[in-house]
Image: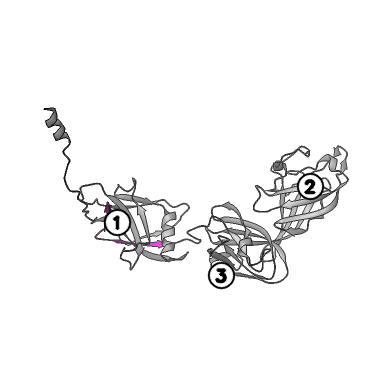
Amino acid sequence: MLTIIAITSCKKDTRAFNADVAPVTTLSAPDNAASFTLAPATGPSIQFKWTASPTQDLVLYEVAFDKADGDFSKPIYKVLSDGSGVQTQATITQKVLNTIASMAGIASLSTGTLKWAVIVSKETNAKVSTTSHTIQLTRPAGFAVLPAALYLTGSATEQGTDLSKALPFKKISDGVFELYTSLTAGTYSLVDGTTGTPTSYSIQNNISVVAGGSTTVTGSKNVYRISLDLSNAAATITQIVSVGFFNAPDNKVYFELPYVGNSQWEIDNVKIVIPQESYGLDSRYKYKFTVMDSNGNQSVEWYGSINSDNPDPSTASPASYFYMYPVDNSQFNFCFKIVPAYNNKNANVNVNFSPGIPNYNNTITLK
């Protein structure tokens, strides 16, 4: 009896594995020739739906996108269906659709048509649905694929044309970058890397960013803040006319700091004087930036402390005490203070807006 049981239990199921797969035959949503104006940041996701393949075993589904004249032999992009590929629908964000449209050659602020179908697969066997739908997509301004980093290079820049020395931008958020730097007569480009053949961009008319090309600078050397939002393909070029050390008690700029390169302004060996008021020494100060837009209009920006009031610092104060933030034009609020022991001594005063530091800051260092 034991022998019979053992022999029986060792018998294998010799059924042949059936790798056949039946294609999807019906696409249900979006409707054929559906049209969408994409809003990648705020628009709701779009659901693509179809009827199940009649294949009995477990299969995987992918939504495949191709150009309007494509045959899905080499799809532009594929998206696994919901539930890790087992559900008969795929929820696709408008951000992803914007990327797909860009890959298909649809330019920003343009409308184009794509085809989509469903690929059903089991093991290595895959079949495209017997029908496909078209979808019309209107892209917003900006780039669908945003670079993780951005650099400035070219003959007009502080580091010249050596790509390996290109100047990094400070990344503010996804697609948003900022750099304080000087530009001289020549050309410059924006690139997403410092080796190989990076993707490049250029600024047109001081207001927009386009793929490829370069920007020409004429005239004398000046300092600028280059602000970019690639999600909107927008650029703002602001000239930094001057950076002044503003003394709050006297309500005036004591001195201006020359630009010294590498996103920094510094004046060396200047005498630090803390005004004597009736209530004692008052060392409150902040910085007055005089700026000019691309149309030649001047205005003032103020940078100071994140705190509306501060205690006197010491040589042991944390670096964060001197972090710079945009502040209002009030005479006494959001000011830094000077180490009391620095009164009537010579020092170097530095304003550092380098992109690689944790936060823009200023320092006063005794000679």
x and y, in percent, of residue 45 in the image:
40, 51
The mark that comes first in sequence, 1 or 2, is 1
At mark 2, the secondary structure is: strand
Which residue in the structure is indicated by mark 3?
213
In reply to whether residue 150 is colored magenta, the answer given is no
Report the side of 159 relative to 120 (left or right): right
| Rendered image: mark on residue 315 | none
Residue lying at 71% horizontally and 42% vertically, measured from the top left = 319
Indicate the amino acid at tag 3: Gly
In the rendered image, the quadrant that contains the N terminus is top left
- Label 2 to label 3: alpha-carbon separation: 42 Å
Q: Quadrant of residue 72?
A: bottom left
Q: Which mark is residue 118?
A: 1
Residue 166: horizontal and vertical position, in percent? 62, 61
The residue type indicated by label 1 comes to: Val
* Residue 137 part of the magenta-drawn span: yes
Residue numbers of the magenta segment: 114-143
Few, some or many residues within 10 Å of mark 2 (<14, 14–19, 20+): some
Which element carries disc 1, helix, strand or loop?
strand
Relative to 277, is 180 above or below?
below
Disc 2 to disc 3: CB gap under 8 Å:
no
